[in-house]
Image (cartoon, coloured by chain):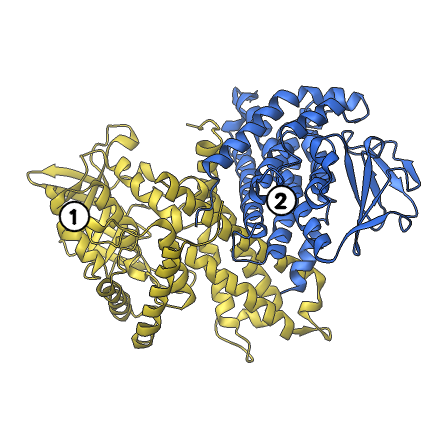
Amino acid sequence: MDLRYTNSELAFREELRAWLREVLPSVPPEPHRNDWEGRRAWDTGWQRMLFDAGYAGINWPKEYGGRGATPTEHLIFLEETERMRAPYVGMNFVGLLHAGPTLIAEATEEQKAYHLPGILKGEHVWCQGFSEPGAGSDLASLRCRAFRDGDDYVISGSKIWTSFGHTADYCEMLVRTDPDAPKHKGITWLILPMNAAGIDIRPLRTMEGSTEFCEVYFDEVRVPVKNRVGDENDGWRVTMVTLAFERGTAFVSEMLQSMELVRDLTDLAKKITRHGSTAWEDAGLRRELAHLSGELDALWALTKRNISEAQRKGLVGAGGNVFKVAYTDVRQKLGDISMRLLDRASLSLDDMAGLPTGKHVKGRIHALSIGIAAGTSQVQKNIVSERVLGLPKDR
Amino acid sequence: MDFWPTDDQAALQEGVRTFCQGRFPFETLHDIEAAGGRIDRSAWKDIADMGVFSLRTDGFGITDAALVFEELGRALVPGPLVATYLAATHLSDSAAASGAAIIGLAEVAEPVTVIEHADDLDVLLLLDSNGVRRMAPDALPTDVVERPVDPLTPLRLAHAVTAGGDMVLSGADARAFRLEGTLLTAAMQVGVSFAAIDLAVEYAKGREQFGRPIGQFQAVKHMCADMLTRAEVARSAMYAAAANLEGKGEDDAEHAVRVAKMLAGDAAIFCGKTGIQLHGGMGFTWEVNAQRFWKRATVLDTHFGNSDIHADAIAAAM
């Protein structure tokens, strides 16, 4: 059990830092969150810079254009890009973290040859068509239909929570191809071009005020059969490859931001006064923050355990589920503390009276989504209790 | 970076687990309890022969010791294990290493100073802010505590703890002694947490109500998942503290140890409590072991500073 980095890992970190120092000044300022054209250009522009420097698809195998980095190098990449405030993966998220890895594992050579370079170079943005209004935590009950008509599948139904649906080029799509089979056995995974006829995209406004999510409606949308990944009705298994990928390192940047949030809140508490003394003089608040700070240290250690396990065994264990449950709780508590600290200054989404209220309020709202996105905390707990502890399924 | 037990470490941990299951099966805890929590000298010798107290002089590292003490905690092995290990390691006490002597440790504390297993000790170490003093176990005037919370941890209440003994460690040496003791206590707390989880999960799989195992109910499942989450987070902090203390990390070891003790202490009490709740009425009985994990957790929380004390120290450095 050794937390020290090897010489080659340290060399990788140094090389990456040097490159980031060189290129970050040339990155333009981040566009407004609802400027979708601007954001697409910014996110994919950064992806292209990564590609040109050999950092695109950091953990993808070399034979498919990735860097073939070890899990530890992947962690170093996420850590350094976050610490040096490089652009986040943004709109390239689904392509790089979901669709790409699934294609690598399951697609035909022809599909890989076309799509993987598009993702790596930032030429193609992907979105995800998994959840439906009637299929959330119970994803396998999805009902969006696709039937065979000659060389096409014809899709009718709807999807929801499709991030970046209105700017994406392709959608990784789960459809019901056999309504009579048991629910896990009648699903197929398709590559859907988002410019196909019959797609209606309606942005959904979140409580943050963002329109990142979309509802997508499909009215007899035709997709060539050659766009199928894996066998017909084998899409659930194909999907599990992607989901296992997501729970490895998806929250590393988030967590590093939370560590910084602890430092910000500590500074804020030392500045804000109430009843004549600073908030930091409140022993209860100090203890609470110390606790959360310690938990974040522990979660960082847990991440390193998960990474090391993946490195040793070649697969991601259940540590990712445990991480997400614990991290959600910590992040939401930090949000609560920030609001108690700011008190009535916490009521504005913009900074108030010289206090940095905006980012804390928005951060607290964002924290509410963490326990929901990528599998709710309740679903995570089901997974932990059934797959790790072996408790019987209730089905 | 390779933050996962090596094959040798996994084998070491497995070996200690097998030893504990053979030598200290949970059924024997009732007998030890009936004997007033007194330590069986031949069992103590077996622990020593397993190499527990001489780990460091035998060439093992702190991370190895952390894995071993996690197993000792998991099996609820009674006695001043950490204190005897510390005497062998930091005081070069060969009688401690060989199992010939049982070494106790009491921390001078407010509101009371208590000595565990006092009637079985050959040597008492007294720890305060100045360092470690060594004395005969009867050097301090004490009264027996008639009904200790954990019947496997008999207690005496000490009076006039300012007197006597030889100062054997101070300054940086005393600090190293305290840090390693804190870490290994956290390791035992992690072990207690996982033992509570194992028992609770086994019960949830077998106990039927409303025509099915209660482990099928999400309310019960989520209790188990919450226990595991706390325990794994604490275990991660504890392993990180061990690695840093051994010089195999880049973070401040004292901070890492405080975090480990704080989280492991809370995890052990939480898992102990939740394990009792999960057993329903049986959890509240003397017969079912669920209560024993909680009781040991409450004892260990008071060793080397409880969670609040470490949280305050962490805050002071923020």
- Image point (18%, 61%), residue name: A123
Question: Mark 1 sits on what residue?
Answer: A112
Q: Position of residue B75 (x, y in %)?
A: 64, 29
**Nearer the observer, A331 or A251:** A251
Q: Position of residue A82 (x, y in %)?
A: 40, 64
* Residue A147: quarter of image: top left
Toward the left, the furthest residue is A150
Q: Which chain is yellow?
A: A
- Image point (32%, 36%), residue name: A141
- Residue type at mark 1 is Lys
Q: Position of residue B212 (x, y in %)?
A: 51, 21
- Image point (69%, 58%), residue name: B312
Q: Is residue B283 left or right of residue A333?
A: right
Compared with residue A35, is residue B68 higher up or lower down, i.e. above or below? Answer: above
Q: Position of residue B48 (x, y in %)?
A: 67, 30
Chain ID for label 1? A
* Residue A283: quarter of image: bottom right
Crowd band around label 2 with a 10 angstrom C-alpha radius: few (<14), some (14–19), many (20+): many
Compared with residue B54, is residue B20 higher up or lower down, i.e. above or below? Answer: above
Task: State the mark number for residue B264.
Answer: 2
Q: CA distance from mark 1 to mark 2?
A: 47 Å
Q: Is residue B253 left or right of residue B113?
A: left
Quadrant where the C terminus of chain B is found in the figure? bottom right
**Nearer the observer, B124 or B30:** B124
- Residue type at mark 2 is Ala
Chain B representation colour: blue
Q: Secondary structure at mark 1?
A: helix
**Nearer the observer, B162 or B157:** B162
